[in-house]
Image (spheres, rainbow, N blue to C red):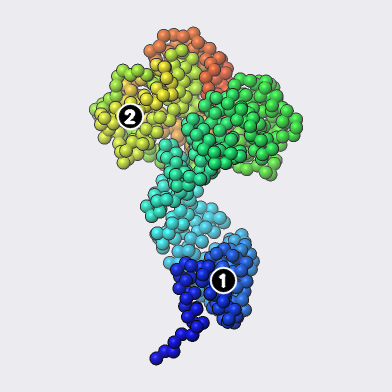
Amino acid sequence: MAPPPTQAEQHTQQAQTLFQAGQLPEALIIYRALSEQSPDDANHWLMLGVIYSTLNQLEEAVRCGKKVVTLAPNAVAGHRNLGSFYLRSGQHSNAESAFRTALSLEPGNSINHNNLGIALAARGELEPAIECYRSALQSEPQFGEARHNLANAQQAEFGPDQANADFMLAVQHDPDNIQYLYSLAQNQAHLQRHQDALTTLQTLLLKQPDHADAYLAIADAYNNMGRIQHSITSVRRAAELKPDSTAILLLLGNLLVQHGSPEEAFISFDQALKMDPANVAAQYGRGRSLFQSGRFQEALDVYADVPETNNIGIDIIAARASVLERMGNLDDCLSVLTTEIERGNTGTYLLTAYARLGRKYGHTQYAIELLEANLQKISLDDEQLRVTHFYLGQSYDREKQYDDAFKHYRAANDLRGYNHDATADKAFTLDVIRCHPKTTYDRLPQGPEHTDITPIFIVGMPRSGTTLVEQIISSHNDVFAGDELIFIPEMLDLLDSGQCYPRYIDTLDQSQCDSLATRYLENLAQLAPGYAYVTDKLPANFTYLGLIHRLFPNAPIIHCRRNPVDTCLSCYFQDFSAHHSYAYDLVSLGTHYRQYHAITTHFREQLEIPMLDATYETMVADTETESRKLIQYCGLEWDDQCLKFYESSRRTKTASFDQVRQPIYTQSVQRWRHYEQHLGPLLSALGTLTDEKQS
């Protein structure tokens, strides 16, 4: 018969029970007493160290860990724990030493190899860390943590390409591990494999539905895929899960500004300010949303309240200058900028605002000198470098120094960091054409022929003259300039079809078509109360023309066309505020243009969708004749104000806002000839389209 437990054994058992139940403070009291009664018992000190570490009392944990390895120098667990305590304390060299001792005592132990790799990686020694993780996996091939650590180290050292296979293996080893799934999704996003990232994140959410960061990553994936409303919806869900996060509200606000919903953005920034009234980023965001809404004076008032002593003070001044510029107060704008430059304040966005005024005030060469000096600042991040290169490109172009201009435009685009998925682009084009055969299309249900408000769709490639056409039409007294409305893609994004556009087109029934048409018209009525006509010049609407014509059979469709090389070059030279991944590479631009051409040709020639071609070069050569054609096609009476479009006070949010102040922008015709020697990749990608005057 076993002897009854001693009092010390009873106390030890009690402490272990409390520890296992998570009652750490109570367990700590007993282990302290036991360590005082038996100071040479390494097990008591071992447990004390673990408890102190769990309670985040790391200094005490290290003290206990040292005691353990002194009392039991050959006990692997003691050195392993001490290394972990050092690691959590930021003492990476000491952690490495402790883990090496543990490894020397058990050289074949996979945990010891993994731990040493963690310490080395924390010190930035990634290649030795990678070898440690590989050694751990040789001992235990199914060791998920070591596989995950190996993937992280390879990603940091060699990039996402080298890491992806190991991230996938880590998930295979432990498919329920949330961190492994999240890391895989992040790596897939780095590789621009956004659909794969989305699939991984959706798997993660099935296992942990309240993972706010996963929703943020999903939002990023959707945004990169062009699914705008889904992106915003995902950020809203993250905000619900973390209602106290000003960072998420700021992200939501910035996303809404980026996608042309400034009124909703204002609400998000306002909520962030209620939580943190001193948050300068939220104040700045409020100003941006007011600016985009055309509420320029209110934006100025907001910017005036932001303390200039803050580290973004110069950006606030640049923002104020931009508002004055947009209001047409160019002299005041120049005065603000010149004053700051004379003070030695040369923030990136202040300098770019100054460069924009170079054409009017004749200081382009000085702006170039300032921007070139800005490039030498080691403090610039990639975004500031990119913007500086873009404005140097514009400035050199203005000075007719075309080789220098192209050098900077290329540098700016290279800094974008986006990889356009040309394969997906081509597959989408084939899908659009395949899903719109003539026989099926003619049988699709149709929306109302007569409506209280008439949309005017202006489509085409970006930089093909859509802004010019809208400016002319919207100068008519009966027309409201809607600008680039995202109503069509948003509605289709939310359509509960179980498939992506265009694969559900042949399944649409009359009630769905009526619902889509009604929702769109309600959006227009809310946007432009009292107007009979509203323009929608979202260029990408060309992909939806088949559906648009069925929903609104009598709505005018104006197809803006321009020399394809000029169009692509203008895209390449444009610092788009929204995401156009194809525009940052000459080959991608050429192939994307071919996809656009194939889709519009199919809709015009095979489906016989009526549309008026508005050719940029013809508009420039004979503005009045072409303007009259536009107005007549829209079913409107002629209005002489349509020839004075450059005097219109309406806001322009897109890249062409500076051009609409000029009677006509003739400098853009055959502009590509100045850059012909640099455009070989673009010309090859365009192929036979290069020879067309317009396409």
Image location of residue 117, percent across then percent down: 56, 65
Q: Residue furthest right?
A: 343
Q: Where's the C terminus, which quadrant?
A: top left
Q: Is residue 231 visible?
A: no
Q: Amino acid at mark 1?
A: Gly
Q: Where's the N terminus, which quadrant?
A: bottom left
Few, some or many residues within 10 Å of mark 1 (<14, 14–19, 20+): many
Image location of residue 618, percent across then percent down: 48, 16
User: Does residue 565 sit above or below 100 in this rendering?
Assistant: above
Residue named by callout 2: 516
Residue sitting nearer the eye, 283 or 491 = 283
Q: At x 61% / y 63%, what residue is drawn?
A: 89
Residue named by callout 1: 49
Q: Quadrant of residue 487?
A: top left
Q: At x 59% / y 21%, what residue is drawn?
A: 327
Q: At x 31% / y 18%, what residue is drawn?
A: 450
User: Does residue 415 sit above or below 139 in this rendering?
Assistant: above
Distance Cα–Cα, label 2 vs label 1: 64 Å
State the SS at label 1.
Answer: helix
